Structures are given as structure tokens and as C-alpha cells.
DNA sequence: CTACTATTCAATAGAATACTTGAACATATG
DNA sequence: CATATGTTCAAGTATTCTATTGAATAGTAG
């Protein structure tokens, strides 16, 4: 292999790896990834969740599909996109860690928009497990019910944050409540805890979301009939 | 936090994370990262190693610097760039794994350009350690000597592949030789092993490069006086 | 078959990116 | 001081990316 051929090799090789970087080089696509980490979603749902037009969401999904980060399945008129692999979430998680530890701006943004997050008394996964064993915790999944169906923490009750106010009467005040949602940047659990606290409950927020919980090697439950 | 503010939050947040993706979205930059994983290098060296013009290499390095993936230090007229953090290598490694397992094209390219790699009888890190303990191995670092100085495997001898032919007489044929270089896509060790085998040596190629070895938690040696 | 819905495609305009060239800047040396 | 060297900057051009719009396609239901 001469010098020129060696250069060609590196160029075409690293260009292939760059396809993955390109797929991760847009904020909307990263947000899509994060929602997809909760389980498969239709284009329509994804567009709604991320505040994009359908056509735009579709195009971004196709970019990630071309990079092999996501896969699709058709069911009726719906196209259900999902992460191609658990590794893809690992990759996003690693990227997130690098961002959190190196890009000061990120911390500043979280502080600005989620200023009073410490009032939500975050609880860690190990601590939650301990408390669950003791049996004095009500674990609340406040994500949309489809995501609960796709995978949820063992023993969790599903009350989407949008319905929480209407279902408060069903929750006893005897137990401390721990609410969780999609992950560290999901605000469903923040909102739920704030609402619960305002109504006299003792409520805390789980630091992890479902994908982080799973990445820790902890078990999740799949609803009967969910794919 | 109302709906609009929530959207704004997600948009600005994920846009920040996308800065990292953008920095990783170009093949040249990934190749720069891989060379930087060997230790700090001047712009000139990096440009040479990656076959870019100086101005172009400088600009790519500044893109990665803006994303906080690399840092610089000036010494005299030279600017020495380095990875900002071990985490950055972890990120690249994760991305590499995703690429290797998901993008078929990558395997095809490696097959095409490094077709006879299996003849080099790759040896794994644990196997090498075993053999080093037994003491019947000569371990050869065939990277440029500056990279050897920055960090090398314990007990390794430095003979850059460019000088190897001239130094063959110094190598006894009694011991089996294991050559290593920068990593899985570096061909220095391939060339070294091919040359050694052609001259009657028993030679093999270490699968890992120095950064992968370090990422496994194995020790490296830093030359006296190297930073 | 028609009507309907979810998604993709195609065309477009505006923004961002990549590479080159030559000038400008910073540091070291005589 | 002038000169030399490594690096960065600025400008220009070609290319790629993003979001929007409206049309086309694929499947479902009547």
C-alpha cells in the first residue's frame, strides 16, 4: 500500500465514521433520539413531541436512518421509528456526559430554565431501590402511557403528567411519592413533583429516566401486548 | 414554565449538545482526534499526518476547540493541540464501536485496503500480557518517536516503522516480536509485521493501540522529560 | 373504485461548512 | 532592529444542510 493509497483509505474510512457524527450534529435529531430511547414512536408523535413539522421530522429521521442509528417498521399507515440498537443510546449518553462535563453553557441553560430543581429533592437509582425494598414508596411514571407500555420501572404506576391533576384523589398521602420520566432533561417529573408538593404530598424526582435505568443494568417491565 | 418556554429550553439545550456532534461530523476531524489520542502534536505535524494543508488543519482544530474537545498550549512558535479529556477518547471509541457494528461499509473498506490482515496474526491485550510475563516476547512500538515519548507500553522498544528496515540487525530472531501502533486503523504495525515476517522473524500485530490499551485500564509509561 | 390519512418526496431559498489563497500575527533568532 | 517560521485570519467559491411548501405515494376504510 503506497502513500497515496493509504491516504485514500483513511479518507474513505473516517468519512464513514463521520456519517454518525453528522447524524448527531443537529439539536432536533438529538431530541428525537432521546424520545426514541423511550421506545418506538410514529413520525406524527415524534413531530409533536419535538415541536417540528411532520415533513421536517420525517427528513431528520431519514438522516439518522441513513446513518443506521434508527430503524423503521410500518404498521398500517404509521411508520414506527426506533433506535437501531442499545449501543446508540450508549453513544448519546457518552456524548451527553462529555457535554455536561465540558460545555459550561449546558449547565447554565439547565440552571436558567430549571432553576429550582434542587427543591425537587432528586433521588438516585440505588437510593430508590433501597426505599422500594423497604416498601414505603409510591413510584410514579408520568410519561405518556404508550411509553409506559413500551417499558417502565418495576412496580411503577402510570399517570401521565397531563392527567395528574385529575387523578390526585387516587393517590394516598401516606407514602412518599417518587416520580420519574424520560431522563435528566425531561421536565414531566419536575412538573409532577411540583404539583404533588403543592397539594401536600411528599414527593421527589428520580434522577434517572427509563433508558438510564436500563443502561445501569436494572430491570424494566414491558406491558403485555406492547412490542 | 409554559409550553413555549419549554420548547425554547429543549431547543437551546440540544443545540449545545449538537456542538459536539458537529465537531465529530467530519472525517478529517475524526482522523485528527485519533492522532491526538497518541498525545499532543503541533499543527504542522497534524497537517502532515492527516494529509491536510496547514490552514485547513488549523481550522478543523479550532472547530474542535470551540466544542471543547481539544485544548492548545503554546511553546515557542508551536501550538500543541491535545485531547481535552480522556472522556473525549471514550466518546470517539464509542462512536467507532457503533460504526463498526452498524455500518457495513466500514468493514468493507477495511477488507478492501487491509485485505491480508489476518496473516499478521493479531494478538489481544490479555494474551500479550500473558506472553510478556512468560518473557519470550519483544514488544515493538513502531509509531513516531515523539508519540513513544508521550506514552508507550511498558517494556516496549521504540523503532519507528520508517526506520525499521535500517535497524533490523539490532533485533534478534530468538524472540517472537509483537508490534503495535496507534490503533485498529493504523497501518504502521501492519507494515512492520509484514517487513519482519519477510526477513524471517516471527512477528505479530497487537490488536490495540496505545489509547485503547490505556482505556482498558492498563498502564503506560511516559518518557522522562515528556509532558 | 373513492376518500382519507400518514408519510415521503421534490423543489426552493437561505444558512452553514469546507477548502484554498494570500495576508496578518506571534514568537524566536541574528 | 530585520528576518524567518509556525499559526491564524479573512475573503471567496463551491458544496452541503435546514426548513418550508406543496405534490406524490402507500396504506386503510367505505
Image (cartoon, coloured by chain):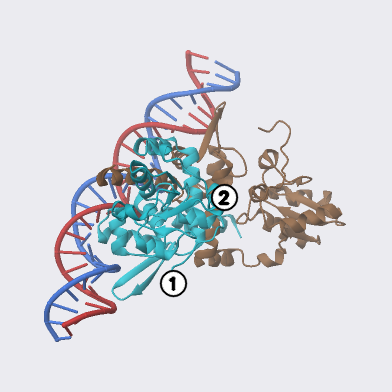
Chain colours: A cyan, B brown, C blue, D red
- Give the chain of mark 1: A
Q: Is residue A14 visible?
A: no
Q: Residue at x 48, y 50 (%)?
A: A208
Expressed as whole percent of the image width and height from the top left, the position of residue B14 reads 38, 46
Expressed as whole percent of the image width and height from the top left, the position of residue A138 reads 45, 53
Residue A72 image-quadrant placement = bottom left
What is the C-alpha distance between the residues marked 1 and 2? 27 Å
Give the mark, 1 or 2, whose residue is nearer the N terminus.
2
Find residue A224 and name its label.
1
Work out whether residue A145 or residue B186 is closer to the camera in this orientation and state it.
A145
Looking at the image, which residue sits at the far right? B174
User: Quick one: quadrant of the C terminus of chain B?
Assistant: top right
Work out whether residue B53 or residue B156 is closer to the camera in this orientation and state it.
B156
Q: Residue at x 40, y 61 (%)?
A: A148
Find residue A130 and name its label.
2
Find residue B67 and name its label.
none
User: Quick one: quadrant of the N terminus of chain B?
Assistant: top left
Q: Residue at x 63, y 53 (%)?
A: B183
Q: Residue at x 37, y 39 (%)?
A: A114
Amino acid at each position: 500500500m503506497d502513500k497515496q493509497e493509504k491516504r485514500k483509505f483513511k479518507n474513505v474510512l473516517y468519512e464513514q465514521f463521520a456519517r454518525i457524527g453528522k447524524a448527531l450534529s443537529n439539536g432536533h435529531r438529538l431530541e428525537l433520539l432521546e424520545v426514541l430511547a423511550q421506545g418506538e414512536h410514529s413520525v406524527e408523535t415524534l413531530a409533536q413531541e419535538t415541536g417540528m413539522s411532520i415533513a421536517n421530522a420525517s427528513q431528520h429521521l431519514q438522516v439518522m436512518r441513513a446513518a443506521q442509528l434508527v430503524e423503521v417498521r410500518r404498521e398500517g399507515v404509521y411508520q414506527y421509528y426506533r433506535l437501531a440498537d442499545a449501543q446508540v443510546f450508549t453513544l448519546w449518553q457518552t456524548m451527553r456526559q462529555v457535554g455536561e462535563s465540558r460545555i459550561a453553557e449546558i449547565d447554565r441553560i439547565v440552571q436558567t430554565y430549571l432553576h429550582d430543581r434542587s427543591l425537587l429533592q432528586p433521588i438516585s437509582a440505588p437510593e430508590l431501590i433501597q426505599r422500594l425494598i423497604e416498601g414505603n414508596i409510591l413510584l410514579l411514571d408520568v410519561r405518556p402511557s404508550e411509553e409506559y407500555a413500551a417499558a417502565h420501572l418495576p412496580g411503577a404506576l402510570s399517570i401521565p403528567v397531563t392527567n395528574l391533576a385529575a387523578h390526585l384523589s387516587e393517590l394516598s398521602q401516606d407514602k412518599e411519592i417518587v416520580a420519574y420520566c424520560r431522563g435528566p432533561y425531561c421536565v414531566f417529573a419536575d412538573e409532577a413533583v411540583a404539583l404533588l408538593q403543592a397539594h401536600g404530598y411528599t414527593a421527589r424526582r428520580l434522577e434517572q429516566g427509563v433508558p438510564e435505568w436500563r443502561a445501569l443494568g436494572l430491570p424494566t417491565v414491558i406491558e403485555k401486548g406492547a412490542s
